[in-house]
Image (tube, coloured by chain):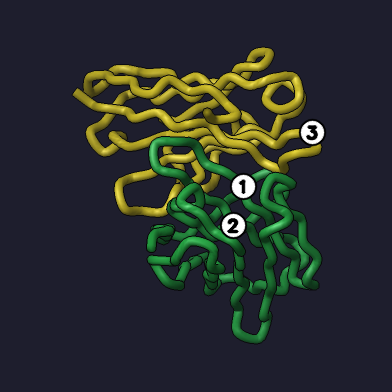
Chain colours: A green, B yellow
């Protein structure tokens, strides 16, 4: 079955860059039917869509984060990645990777907590 | 503050039915049929239980149903079971230029 798994540091210092990787199994990351998204959940608040990437490398980012976000995909490793620069405490959240059909996000990873603190 | 508004909590007894609302605007919930619902158990990945307002993915119990009226979508769970206790959140495609998919704040369902 389709599975996604986030990996990366759980603690990032303020002003540094948050880097996460998502490993996909059970489906081809090169399938033209899907995009691959990052979504985060701030403690006590709702979910926020960060952006998505197509297997070709084309991206679409949430405009509120666009200046600090970059995403990449490595189809040979079945992975896609997120980089968020100049982080602050406001970026502390559970980060999810997910499969995105543009009108519905249908499979999610379990999520990984990233804390921004010195 | 979440883009879509959900009640923070709902509760019901086993066997009863409950409904969770998800209120947005004409740019999202009211403007398309791409409303989804998710169930999330503690420590687990969110699970899609309803898509396109009222469709169930394969394997999802028919005790879960979805509907929409105007800018408000609803999730109904009938015949409540203890295993239904979880967080539920909605999402909607949005035509706003600032987002792609937006989410509700989530509702904690307690089975009494």
Q: What residue is pinned by disc 1?
A: A49
Q: Which mark is residue A38?
A: 2
Labels 2 and 1 touching (C-beta < 8 A): yes
Earlier residue among tags 2 and 1? 2
Q: Quadrant of residue A83?
A: bottom right
Q: Looking at the picture, how far across and down is residue B65, in whole percent?
A: 50, 27
* Image quarter of the C terminus of chain B: top left
Q: Quadrant of residue B93?
A: top right
Labels 1 and 3 touching (C-beta < 8 A): no
Q: Is residue A56 left or right of residue A108?
A: right
Labels 3 and 2 touching (C-beta < 8 A): no
Q: Nearer the viewer, residue B11 or A48?
A: A48
Q: Looking at the picture, how far across and down is residue A46, in whole percent?
A: 49, 36
**Residue furthest to the left:** B112
> In percent of the image, x 42 and y 40: which residue is there?
B39
Q: What residue is pinned by disc 3?
A: B95
**Residue furthest to the bottom:** A76
Measured along the vertical axis of the image, is residue B87 above or below residue A111? above
> In percent of the image, x 44 and y 66: which residue is there?
A12
Please, what secondary structure does the residue beneath circle 3 have? loop
> In percent of the image, x 62 and y 19: which residue is there?
B68
Q: Looking at the picture, how far across and down is residue B41, in whole percent?
A: 33, 45
Residue neighbourhood size for the residue with mark 3, other residues' Cα within 10 Å, grouped as few (<14), some (14–19), many (≥20): some
Q: Is residue A112 left or right of residue A106?
A: left
**How many numbered callouts?**
3
């Amino acid at each position: 079955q389709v599975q996604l798994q986030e990996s990366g540091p759980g603690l990032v210092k303020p002003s540094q860059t948050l880097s996460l990787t998502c490993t996909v199994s059970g489906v081809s990351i090169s399938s033209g039917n899907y995009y691959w998204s990052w979504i985060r959940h701030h403690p006590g608040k709702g979910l926020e869509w960060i952006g998505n990437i197509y297997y070709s490398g084309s991206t679409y980012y949430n405009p509120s984060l666009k200046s600090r976000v970059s995403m990449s995909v490595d189809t040979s490793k079945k992975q896609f990645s997120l980089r968020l620069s100049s982080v602050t405490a406001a970026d502390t959240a559970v980060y999810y990777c997910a499969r995105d059909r543009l009108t519905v996000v249908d499979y999610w990873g379990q999520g990984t907590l990233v804390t921004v603190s010195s | 503050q979440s883009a879509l508004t959900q009640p923070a909590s709902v509760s019901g007894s086993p066997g009863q039915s409950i409904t969770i609302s998800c209120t947005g605007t004409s740019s999202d919930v009211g403007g398309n049929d791409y409303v989804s619902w998710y169930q999330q158990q503690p420590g687990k990945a969110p699970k899609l239980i309803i898509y396109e307002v009222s469709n169930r993915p394969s394997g999802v119990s028919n005790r879960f149903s979805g509907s929409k009226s105007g800018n408000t979508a609803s999730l109904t769970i009938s015949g409540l079971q203890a295993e239904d206790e979880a967080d539920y959140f909605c999402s909607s495609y949005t035509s706003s230029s600032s987002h792609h998919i937006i989410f509700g704040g989530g509702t904690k369902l307690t089975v009494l």
